Amino acid sequence: MKVIKVKNSEEAGLRASIIISNRIQNNPSLVLGLATGSTPLPTYEHLIANNRKGLISFANVTTFNLDEYRGLNGQHPQSYRFFMNENLFKKIDIKLDRTFIPDGLNPSEAANYDNLIAEAGGIDLQLLGLGLNGHIGFNEPGTSFESLTHIVGLTDSTIEANARFFESKEDVPTQAISMGLKSIMNAKEIILVATGANKALAVSQLVKGTLSEE
Ligand code: F6R
C-alpha cells in the first residue's frame, strides 16, 4: 500500500484523476470501478476536463459502480445511477451501455454482478471512498473478506449519514446492493481517497491498524 498525503480534497481529486487518466491513456479499454458520494466529485471534474481537452477518451472504457440503494430506480435523484449520469457519464464520451451499476429494482441480479465484472475481464482500477466508520461501498465493518456482490442492511449510522440527501431519515432506503470485499479486492489496482478531519480515525486505523474485517 502506498499512502499519498495531500493538502485538501481538491488536490486529492487531481492526484486521483492523474492516475486514472494515465491508466486510460495506457489502456483505452480500461475496466474502471467507480464510487459515488462527495469524495470522488473533484476526481470526476478533472476527468471530465481531461476528456473535453481530448487528453483521454472513455469511448472504449467500461465502468462498474460499487453500489446502489435497493428500491430506487435510476430516475430517482438519490439513486446512484442518477448520480453517476449527472456527475460523470453525461459529461464524457462514454457509451452508457458500458456503464454498470447494481440494479436497485432487481436485487436478485446482485449474484450475477461479479460474473458481469469477470466477463468484462475484471476491474483494472477501482476508485473507492471511505465511510466515517471505515465502510467501503456499503460494506460495514465486520463484512466478510469473502463477500461478493450482495444485499446489505444499512446500519443506523449510515442511514443517518446519508439522510442529508433525502427529505427525511425515513426516506433513506434501509437496504442496498453492494460489491463485496472480495469483489473489490479482485481489482488489479485500487485508489482509496479519504478527505476531511472526520475520516481521520478511519484512515489511521486503515493505515496503522491490524488487518481485520473491522
Ligand atoms: C459510495 C460508497 C461509499 C462512500 C462513503 C464515503 O459509492 O461506496 O462507501 O464512499 O460513504 O462517502 P463520502 O464520499 O460522501 O464521504
Image (spheres, grey):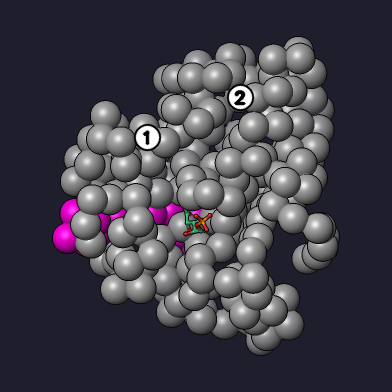
The magenta stretch spans which residues?
Answer: 170-183
The spot of residue 159 in percent (x, y) is 30, 65
Horizontal side, residue 132 vs residue 151: left or right: right
State the CA–CA distance, disc 2 to disc 1: 17 Å
Magenta stretch: includes residue 171: yes
Q: Which residue is label 2 attached to?
A: 61
Question: Would residue 31 be visible to someone looking at this image?
Answer: yes
Which residue is at the far bottom? 210
Instruction: Tell me the residue at 45%/33% (across/down).
Output: 84
The spot of residue 41 in percent (x, y) is 58, 41
Q: Quadrant of residue 122?
A: top right
Q: Which residue is label 1 attached to?
A: 81
Horizontal side, residue 55 vs residue 92: left or right: right
**Alpha-carbon neighbours of circle 2 within 10 Å: few (<14), some, or many (≥20)?**
some
100 lies above or below 194 = above
The spot of residue 201 in percent (x, y) is 62, 80
The foreground one among 47 and 97 is 47
33 lies above or below 159 = above
- Image quadrant for the N terminus? bottom right
Tell me the amino acid under the disc marked 1. Arg
**Alpha-carbon neighbours of circle 1 within 10 Å: few (<14), some, or many (≥20)?**
many
Tell me the amino acid under the disc marked 2. Val
Instruction: Tell me the residue at 51%/81% (across/down).
Output: 214
Instruction: Tell me the residue at 50%/24% (across/down).
Output: 89
The spot of residue 102 in percent (x, y) is 35, 42
Q: Secondary structure at mark 1?
A: helix
